[in-house]
Amino acid sequence: MLEPFKIVEVQRTGVIAIQRGDDQDASDPPLFETT
């Protein structure tokens, strides 16, 4: 699905933070997918 995206460590709330290979950008925040 999101090839250019990489899954980051799962946070305590169980939310998988998916952000681009580059560092987080204020203008382009990472996507949060709740499971």
Image (cartoon, grey):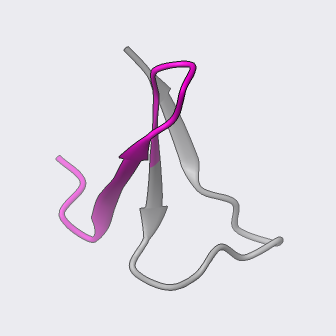
Which residue is more in the foreground, 21 or 9?
9
- List the single residue furthest toward the right: 26
Taking 6 as reference, is 30 left or right? right
For the point 39% across and 79% down, the residue is 21
Which residue is more in the foreground, 4 or 8?
8
For the point 48% across and 61% down, the residue is 19
- Percent across and percent down for residue 20 are 44, 71
Taking 15 as reference, is 35 left or right? left
- List the single residue furthest toward the front: 12
Residues drawn in magenta: 1-17
Q: Quadrant of residue 30?
A: bottom right
Q: Is residue 10 above or below residue 35?
A: below
Q: Is residue 1 above or below residue 14?
A: below
- Percent across and percent down for residue 18 are 43, 51
**Magenta stretch holds residue 23:** no
Q: Is residue 30 above or below residue 32?
A: below
For the point 51% across and 35% down, the residue is 11
- Percent across and percent down for residue 5 are 32, 63
Tag count: 0
- List the single residue furthest toward the bottom: 22
Taking 13 as reference, is 18 left or right? left
Q: Quadrant of residue 25?
A: bottom right
Q: Is residue 13 above or below residue 10?
A: above
Image quadrant in which the C terminus is located:
top left
